[in-house]
Image: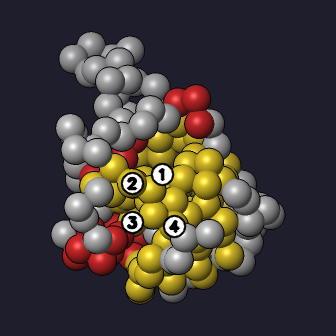
Amino acid sequence: MREGYPEQRPVSARILTPRGWIRGTFHPPRVTHLVDFLNHAGHFVTVTDVTAEAGQGTLEYLSLSRDAMSLVVLEDTVSVEPVSMATQPVRRHRIYALLAEGSLTGGLDVGTQVRVSDFFVHRSGFVLLHDVELRTPGLESPGPWPTVLLHAQRAIGVAELAAR
């Protein structure tokens, strides 16, 4: 660990960008949730051990524009703690999101008194989704993926699905 920096933990992920999928590792502080780390990062986030899904080789690190990331699919759910919703009770809603690169369905936890549409009106960064099915080119499996971060501003539209 470098002196003066907080202890970090590696978080491996697949990242959907306008140019397709890449794989890499984020390094948030050990005590910070990844969603909070990304939402409070500067314009660029460092990703290490980066490989392109199309086999472009490996880069030691890449400064990746935070706003270019549509989805972050976490490969190791052990390294992801649940994000608390403060003290208010939550309810899981099944949502559909349309993206320029495809679409997804997944579970979103929001306060019991909050509508999904209102939740997204007030979001500008990443939101945590659960049990996500992805429909995007270049991904070998649609899922379900246990944990996915959706960049709310990269969504073209979001709808709440009827309960099953």
Amino acid type of the residue that numbered disc 4 sits on in the rendered structure: Arg
Q: Residues within 10 Å of mark 3 (few under 14, many from 20)?
A: many
| Of marks 3 and 2, the one in the foreground | 2
Outermost residue on the right side: it is: 140
Q: Which of the two labelled residues, at mark 1 and mark 3, occupies the earlier sequence position? A: 1
Q: Is residue 56 visible?
A: no
**Cα separation between marks 1 and 3:** 19 Å
Residue at numbered disc 1 = 62
Residue 91's disc is 2
Check the image and report above or below for 5 versus 38.
above
**Earlier sequence position, callout 3 versus callout 2:** 2
Contact between marks 1 and 3 (CB within 8 A): the answer is no
In space, the residues marked 3 and 4 are separated at their CA atoms by 17 Å
What amino acid is at disc 3?
His
Give the mark nearer the N terminus: 3 vs 4: 4
Closer to viewer: mark 4 or mark 1: 4
Q: Which residue is mark 4?
A: 94
Q: Position of residue 84 (x, y in %)?
A: 31, 39
Q: Which residue is mark 3?
A: 151
Distance in Å between CA atoms under marks 3 and 2: 20 Å
Q: Are marks 4 and 1 in contact (CB under 8 Å)?
A: no
Secondary structure beneath dot 2 equals: strand
Q: Position of residue 87 (x, y in %)?
A: 20, 38
